[in-house]
Amino acid sequence: MTSNPPELRPDLAPKATLSDAPREGQPTLGMVSLGCPKALVDSERILTRLRAEGYGISPDYAGADAVIVNTCGFLDSAKAESLDAIGEALKENGKVIVTGCLGAEPDYIREHHPRILAVTGPHQYEQVLDAVHQTVPPSPDPFVDLLPTSGVKLTPRHFSYLKISEGCNHKCKFCIIPDMRGKLASRPVHAVLREAEKLVDAGVKELLVISQDTSAYGLDRKYDSHPWKGAEVRSHIQDLSHELGKLAPADELWIRMHYVYPYPHVRELIPLMADPDNALLPYLDIPFQHAHPDVLKRMARPAAGAKTLEEIQAWRSICPDITLRSTFIVGYPGETEVEFQHLLDWMEEAQLDRVGCFKYENVDGARSNALPDHVPEEVKQERWERFMETAQAISEAKLAAKVGQRMQVIIDDIDEDGVATCRTKADAPEIDGNLFIDENTDNLQVGDLVSVEVDEAGDYDLWGRL
């Protein structure tokens, strides 16, 4: 998910806060959150801490005593967006604290924006709070603030991201996330489950499990166990998924898995997805990146295309309804036409349900920059277009096959004309398609889980009726 300032958007601040008039003398902060869902969780945690210390949260620059910009720095395009957001905040407010992934390059930021007040790296909550205290000292009301808080959410009330670990142990040549966010650091399983239970109790209908490497959850903890509801549960993705799936009935809660590497033990999750009594959705978001073995080797990826096809076949034999989403890179250094065509052929065989694609670009500090035989930009563009044509045709055929089916959807929005924007179990928010209902929506509310019959399909979206 990428927020697209340069402006402070009202939907980036918690709705409950926006309805509360700040008390006289209350210090108030703004937040611009860029990048992936993991960064959004960081923003939520920062704002939760600040709220507990007595700070108000402003939806616009004018009402803020200072602005925090949580940046993304993975690609040059993301860096440019972050620098633009910082520049806009400086122009409109003047007092800006920078954090997030681009914060790992403080000299680079200060070179472009020397007037910023402070720079901290990703998930450095204490350093952000220290910078805020120095810029806008707290002024808590002892009768209102400094009390336990349920947490600030930057997502709609009906879904929430659940971050289970930070960092990554892989050494993919095109990626600098381990340098930015460190090695794998998993949260204890009971802490994750406790947070998930609180979110469900607060009315969240969908939990999106995220990390840099979800499959590796608990590996750094040697899969230690913790007591949970009278039993010992391991810090392992299989145990975690089993317990998350029992937090509420499957027709009342969705659990969605993101960033899952195709390790062998992932196969143990598939029976849970096929179990109608478990809330774990039949959905896997897996970053395959490519299919040709030589390209994967140059990427230093921990997977191989042929083995992946075998795993996909095994998953579908256990859970025929499983939805598979992935992302790919075309134009990686050294990629030949033969290797790219291999990827297209692999796509035809794999028949993935949801697919994203990026054209390769250098990232400062990435080892792939030094690889020989970089692909010309016009060739990258041409391959990207051919890839997306293949992916679109697969998506169109798969969606057409759903016409006439009855399925459960979650309602994300209802516009002024009464058109409800929904998602099926096969669709994650912001990145996948939608299902639209344009009749008899008067009694529906955002967050409802309802049954629909699909009556029309497009390239990426569906239309249905109650």
Image (cartoon, helix red, strand yellow):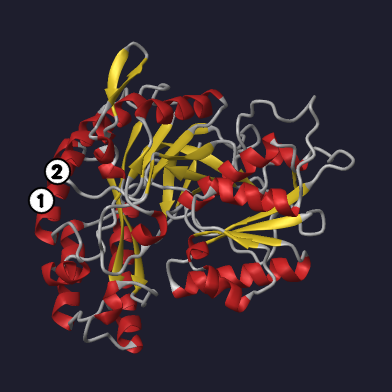
Q: Nearer the viewer, mark 2 or mark 1?
A: 2
Query: Who is closer to the viewer here, 237 or 429?
Result: 237
| Residue at image coords 71%, 52% | 134
Query: Residue, x 20% and y 79% (percent of image)?
Result: 335
Front residue of 386/452: it is: 386
Residue located beneath label 2 in the image: 264
Q: Is residue 310 left or right of residue 261?
A: left
Dividing the picture into quarters, in which one does residue 298 lie?
bottom left
Residue 299 visible in the shown view: yes
Mark 2, Cα crowd under 10 Å, few <14 / some 14-19 / many 20+, is: few
* Residue 322 appearing in the image: no
* Disc assigned to residue 87: none
Q: Which residue is mark 1?
A: 310
**Whether residue 441 is situated above or below residue 461 in the rendered picture:** above
Query: Mark 2 or 1 closer to N-term?
Result: 2
Residue drawn at (70%, 37%), measured in percent from left and top? 53
| Direction from residue 371 to residue 58 in the image, left or right | right
Q: Amino acid at mark 1?
A: Glu
Q: Helix, strand, or loop for circle 2?
A: helix
Residue placed at 53% from the left, 31% from the top?
204
Question: Residue 54's x, y, as percent?
Answer: 75, 37
Relative horizontal placement of residue 349, taking residue 203 as reference (left or right): left
Circle 1 SS class: helix
Q: Position of residue 238 (x, y in %)?
A: 25, 32
Three-letter code for the amino acid on which mark 2 is drawn = Pro
Residue 364 rendering spot, x and y as whole percentages? 39, 75
Toward the viewer: 87 or 310? 87
The vertical placement of 232 against 139, above or below, is above
Q: CA distance from mark 2 to mark 1?
A: 11 Å
